[in-house]
Image (cartoon, helix red, strand yellow):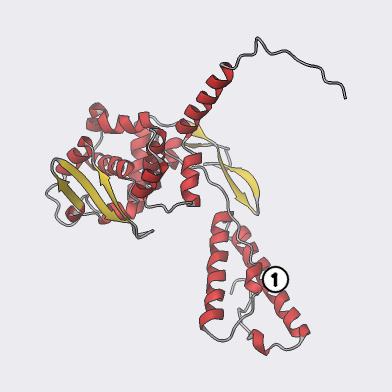
Amino acid sequence: MEKGIVIRIKDYERMKSIRSRIAERNYWKRFYFTFTEYLYQNCDLYDNYVGTQMKLLRAFFNYQIEEMNPTPGNYHNRFYVTSEDIPVLVLVPERLKFLIYNKEFENSLPKRLRIMKDMFVFGCITALSFGDLMKANRTNIEHINKNVYLCTTSQKTNIRSRVFLPDFSKEILLKYKRRKRTLFPPISNVNFNIAIKKIALLAGWTEELEVTRSKRGQHFEKYKDEVKKTNYRFCDLIASHSMRRTAITTMLRMGMHEMNVRIISGHKANSASFSRYVCYADGFMDAEMEKYYLKLDSVDSENYKYKNVEN
């Protein structure tokens, strides 16, 4: 309504003339341009979000073609799906260990933040998403001999996973053993993110990070304060999605086989999103590069003689 454009769908099968089909093609070209222009300029959105809208529209038109009438033709295949590669923000193992074992820091936190810290640590160990963490209850806990496991089904992938719980995770569960419906107290994702950022700030994780986003494939730096050009800090960017990402990258960095990590995280083989975790497991990549450099240094170059080959 803001742009004054009326959305209509014509039956492709009834458009017999080439002229009418060209007119329809041009109509959807204008629609795509105007809609994306509105998302980019008026709504100040980025490639990932705009690409998601295009995916939804293409899915709608595919459904229309297969299940409904009229059939709109294949003009929607021209809707280009944009995307951008956003770096994965995770806790390095040292910081995760700090949250787990540093009792002095834990006791310095208000009671509410101590609860949020426990929840965050539990998510960082079990690779649960925030939604799966919130719905987990006592029926998801399985005891076999002296071992304790968390058995859950991912809301996103519908894949069931079974995770062995270490002692500190069992200690966290004991703190909330009186809860009946869920393992942890209910909280909204927004308030949980606010709490996690506060915990990271109190922990002193305030190093500045460069944040880049893209519009129409053009990358630019994004600031916390656009006027003062103030960069974001680590504590400003950490959120609930960091739990799952931290768990996966930490497992990979500690040498766990990718197949086993996928079983725990619920990713399918050849998953593009899982490949991103492998790429951003910095410590894992650093170790591999260090092996490469050590092998390079061990190459015997003393006995190598250069031979000048004339063409």
Question: In the shown orientation, is residue 75 left or right of residue 288?
Answer: right
Residue drawn at (29%, 40%) of the image: 121
Which element type, helix, strand or loop, lies under badge 1?
Answer: helix
Determine whether 210 is above or below 217 in the image: above
Location of mark 1 (residue):
29
Residue 36: x and y, percent? 63, 63
Determine whether 144 is above or below 93 in the image: below
Question: In the shown orientation, is residue 90 left or right of residue 304?
Answer: left
Q: Nearer the viewer, residue 206 or 293?
A: 293
Q: Nearer the viewer, residue 79 or 278?
A: 278
Residue 23: x and y, percent? 74, 80
Residue drawn at (36%, 44%) of the image: 260
| Badge 1 amino acid | Lys
| Quadrant hosting residue 109 | top left
Circle 1 residues within 10 Å: few <14, some 14–19, many ≥20: some
| Quadrant hosting residue 49 | bottom right
